[in-house]
Amino acid sequence: MKSYEIDMCNGSLWKKMMSFSVPLMFSNILQVIFNMSDVAVVGRFAGASALGAVGSTTILITLFTGILIGMSGGVNAIVALYLGAKNEKAVKQSVHTGIFVCLFFGLLITILGITFARPILKLMDTKEILLSQAVQYFQIYLIGIPFLALYNFGNAVLSAAGDTKRPLYYLSFAGIINIVLNLVFVIVLRLDVIGVGLASVIAQIISAMLIIVRLFRTDAAFGVRIKELKISRVRMVQILKIGVPSALQNSIFAVANIFVQRSVNSFDHIVVEGNSAAANADALIYDMMAAVYMAGTSFIAQNRGAGKKNRILKSYIICVIYSFGVGLILGVGLYIFRYQFLSLFTTESEVVDTGIKRLGIMAFSYCISAFMDGSIAALRGLGRSIGPTVVVILGSCVFSIVWICTVFAHFRTIESLYLLYSVSWTITGIAESLYFICVYRRLKCMPGD
């Protein structure tokens, strides 16, 4: 197991953060492929209405998975902190408490999501022609959420120890199965949106089983033991203190996007379908950049536990530089190959043309988010999560509503709606960066006990 781990407290940060991030990038890409393959298969083999139906649920899926990612982020930060401090007892308590916390939120989301699927989609003004299929796909997909929660938990624990390769292997296997099942269920069995939903659930179950089995088999301090499966109130509070605001923060982005989706839904179905196809790029690029953010959180938390303040600042700077570069390179590449990308999801030229309007603006906006999310990830590693969440609420959610009610209401063009992202990210990024600087300057002691 040692060969899979990275020593985050010693050696070159540039090299080690890159070694940490790259496997995690591929892992995140594969998670995106789960959803993208759903959209691509139904778009090409089940028609534009199925494409629009699956695409209409994307923001809600992002909302719920964002909650799970936020909670697992709390586990990641606390486990990394105590690994850096070499406190095995606290590591074990954090791991065994974390699995209960993540699973609880996964089950809660599944129950509430399935129960209120139709009302929520109607509240978003989902087109009536798309509503029935959207509800079917969404409810089936939600069955796999508890397993996705377990996978994210396992990924958070292994990443805290510097092991980002094994999660990649497990997800690669599950991803291949997901794509194969998509093709079989849709093309051969003609199950349409039901088929792609079932394929995603099966793949999520497989990835969760693989990563949890690994944690049961390892002899390391961060391994899972049946006899130690109990909740530590102290560790639960620590995890929730970071995880809940992080989950709320991720949810806020999704809530802001729900307002955007409602505005998109005010246009005709061609624009809705084009937006659905182009929006697949968001998850692809965000999740690639998110790999660097997790590196920032893990490295900063471990070095905080080890009492190495200088490496905290260096980790933050590298995190922002790497994520900005990833966003810029992928964004430019996306724009260059925009026709080829959109053709993966639809064969209708009108849908492609409307999708390009979104890609033309978003492709050069992704890199801006590095300053916002990189600072948030660093603050999470320092144990600060409430403050960054408040800033996000003001800079993203509140600002988005104001923009939609003023700028978009005035111009009523799809382009004026998409410009919201780059403007809000710039404002929030400046605020979060200044917040990190203030926290870092006041940082004196490194709690590792």
Image (tube, grey):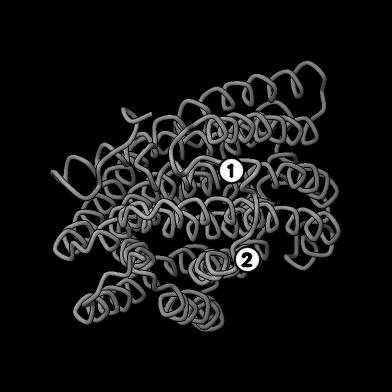
Closer to the eye: label 2 or 1: 2
Residue at (63, 58) in percent of width and height: 101
Mark 2 residue crowding within 10 angstroms, few (<14) / some (14–19) / many (20+): some
Give whichever of 223, 51 is nearer the camera.
223
Is residue 194 left or right of 329 when viewed as pictured? Answer: right
Position of 179 compared to 161: left or right? right
- Asked which quadrant contains residue 439, the reply is bottom left
User: Left of 46 or right of it: where is 331?
Assistant: left
Say if 44 sits above or below 50 in the image.
above
Residue positioned 30% across, 61% down in the render: 305
Quarter of the image with the N terminus is top left
Q: Secondary structure at mark 2?
A: helix
> From the viewer's perspective, is residue 325 above or below residue 417?
above
Which amino acid type is shown beneath numbered disc 2? Ile
In this rendered view, identify the residue nearer to me: 6 or 321: 6
Residue 148 coordinates in the image, percent (x, y): 63, 43
Three-letter code for the amino acid on which mark 1 is drawn:
Val
User: Residue 166's x, y, as percent?
Assistant: 44, 30
Q: Report the residue marked by disc 1.
A: 351
Visible residue check, residue 252:
no
Which residue carries the number 2 mark?
258
**Residue 70, visible in the rendered structure:** yes
Badge 1: few (under 14), some or many (20 or more) residues near its Cα, within 10 Å?
A: many
Q: Residue at x 34, y 76 (%)?
A: 427
